[in-house]
Amino acid sequence: MATILVTGGAGYIGSHTVVELVKAGYEPIIFDNFSNSKPAVLARLHKITGKNIPFYSGDIRVREQLEKVFDENKIDAVIHFAGLKAVGESVKKPLEYYDNNVNGSRTLLMVMRDKGCKNFIFSSSATVYGEPDSVPLTENSPVKRANCPYGQTKIDVEYMAEELQKACPDFSVTLLRYFNPVGAHESGLIGEDPRGIPNNLMPYLTQVAVGRLPYLNIFGNDYPTPDGTCIRDYIHVVDLALGHVAALNKLMNVPGVHIYNLGTGIGYSVLDMVNAFSKAIGHELPHKFAPRRAGDVVQCYADPKKAFEDLGWKALKTLEDMTADSYNWQKNNPQGYED
Ligand code: NAD
Ligand code: UDP
């Protein structure tokens, strides 16, 4: 079976994808510098899969560290998760974000080209669509200049990979634009473990639920939506992981640039999420209304039809699965991975 290099494989989405790759018969190799994850995840992956997943400690910006992996293994494809992802931090540290995300991806693509590995799957984001002119978003919706350095790094890497594919037409470049990943593996052994106070809604909700934080601030209740709060397309991380497996199954060694939205197609408001979460924990989750957060788009959800038609993939898990699994992970690991 094919060997897949998973950069950022110790992180939230990467670790769940490693589990699904093993289940599908692929042989993943993790490459990570633990800048936003912990070594404890490796033992958890062993517990879930029963396998010792090969692991390389390294930084995608360091060519020699990547070359070592390619020299010691025949890598059939790369799934590239490694990157920094905090929108607010990217505004304060733009150069660090361009260095890590853009320079790191460039180094990875150079090593792939030079070592003859032609299959590249990239973690892009719905953020490339900016404030949508209309929803649902299809893959043909316009990509707009990003409103933060993080978003711009996603656009830049998409373009860089597309240009490489033009220059090297036998490359298979797959750009997966994720909507809002939430949830956790049903075992409760792996999940999202942000450092410090979470920026994203779901980890904030789970930390309020276990008493690590007192209440949720809902950023804005005067948006032009039915209940005044913003709308997003939340997708269970296991469904998202399976989207990568579907992309590998269909697109490995298929030259071209392949772009897919990975979302459910359903938009939920922040209040919908609070209500679903309150149901999962059996009491109302403490929350307050707060001013709008700068840069938030009003509503964003996918048209996921293309992924279904081409890859045979669609998200299957419900909002109840997402909230129950997120809560289960946080309850079992109130302080996240403790190393
Ligand atoms: P994460 O931070 O949990 O995982 C990223 C992993 O990459 C971490 O383990 C980190 O240690 C590693 N890493 C970072 N820089 C590295 C480097 N220079 N060299 C080696 N390893 C490095 O994040 P995630 O939520 O799993 O996201 C994975 C990818 O998906 C990221 O590229 C992110 O931008 C993208 N994405 C995430 C979301 C989301 O909401 N979580 C949405 C859209 C896109
Ligand atoms: N949100 C919120 N309180 C929080 C975190 C997020 O009200 O503490 C809202 C945010 O304003 C947005 C939605 O939840 O409308 C999803 O935010 P998240 O940061 O998770 O995803 P993104 O905005 O990047 O899609």
Image (spheres, rainbow, N blue to C red):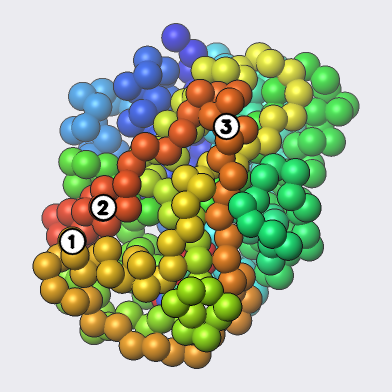
Residue 88 at what x, y percent from top left?
56, 74
Residue that label 1 marks: 280
Residue furthest right as drawn = 167
Q: Earlier in the sequence, mark 3 or mark 1?
A: 1
Q: Name the residue rendered at 69%, 42% in the picture.
A: 139
Provide residue 324's location: percent of width, then percent of height.
Answer: 21, 54
Confirm or deny contact between disc 2 and disc 1 (CB under 8 A): yes
**Kind of residue indicated by mark 2:** Glu
Instruction: Read off the residue under disc 2.
Output: 320
Precedes in sequence: disc 2 or disc 3: 3
User: Which label belongs to residue 307?
Assistant: 3
Separation (CA) of disc 3 from disc 1: 30 Å
Which residue is located at x 36 percent, y 28 percent?
A: 20
Q: Secondary structure at mark 3?
A: helix
Compared across the picture, whether 284 is left or right of 10 comes to left
Quadrant in the picture for residue 131: bottom right
Task: Report x, y in % for residue 48.
Answer: 21, 32
Q: Secondary structure at mark 2?
A: helix
